[in-house]
Amino acid sequence: MDRYTEWMREAIADASRAVATGDVPVAALVLDADGVVIGRGRNERELHQDPTAHAEVVAIREAAAATGDWHLTGATLVVTLEPCVMCAGAILSARIPRVVFGAWDEKAGAVGSVYDVLRDRRLNHSVEVIAGIEADACAALLLDFFEARR
């Protein structure tokens, strides 16, 4: 098993815990250059009634606090769902050089499906994107969550 799969499986386990708060099961990890988790986040929009509390933003905030620096230049962000436009903006702002994600988001994705913000050459920072890691397992979490809501 490669490190991306290992990290994604850890994020999937975290995502499943978001359901208890009524939040969509998405989770993110920020890892330093050595592969150590320095930030961890799950969707917390329902929990905090905060529209910006996406898993990626929560994890980036925690990583910045842990390092004492908002420049996360040596980090990798691993997330179970393709980031949206807001989260892509946060990733760019934090200068995160690599994003690994699981499931594609055909409705709101900003890393290749609807938009491709992270690789837009007009911006001052570009990001390496590794997509589709454990995609079926990530998508199954979301499908199960929304089916139970219907």
Image (tube, rainbow, N blue to C red):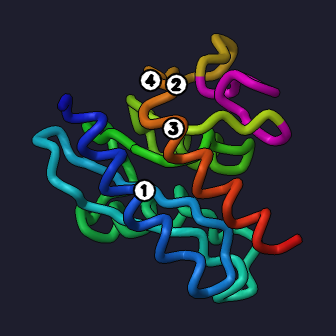
- What is the residue that sits farthest to the right in this orientation? 150
Which residue matches tag 2? 125
Left or right side of 129 for 121? right
Q: Nearer the viewer, mark 2 or mark 3?
A: 3
Eye-nearest disc, 3 or 4: 3
* Viewer-nearest residue: 14 or 35: 14
Snapshot quadrant of residue 24:
bottom right
Q: Nearer the viewer, mark 1 or mark 4?
A: 1
How many other residues sit within 10 Å of disc 3, few (<14), some (14-19) or many (≥20)?
many
- Residue at screen point 81% across, 27% down: 114
Depth check: give the residue in front, 36 or 14. Answer: 14
**Residue 42: which disc?**
none
The answer to which of marks 2 and 3 sits earlier in the sequence is 3
- Helix, strand or loop for disc 4: strand
Which type of secondary structure does the marked residue at label 1 adopt? helix
Q: Position of residue 150 (x, y in %)?
A: 89, 70
Dot 2 and dot 3 residues touching (CB under 8 Å): no
Q: Which mark is residue 130?
A: 4
Instruction: Say above or below: 77 vs 116.
Output: below
The vertical placement of 109 against 72, above or below, is above
Of callouts 1 and 4, the N-terminal one: 1
Identify which residue, 107 or 119, lies in the foreground.
107
Mark-to-mark CA distance, 3 and 4? 9 Å
The stretch in magenta equals: 107-118
Identify the residue under disc 3.
102
Q: Disc 1 vs disc 3: Cβ atoms closer than 8 Å?
A: yes
Q: What amino acid type should be assigned to the residue bearing mark 1?
A: Ile
Q: Which residue is mark 1?
A: 12
Distance CA(mark 4)–CA(mark 2) = 16 Å
**Labels 2 and 1: the sequence-earlier one:** 1
| Most common SS among magenta residues | loop
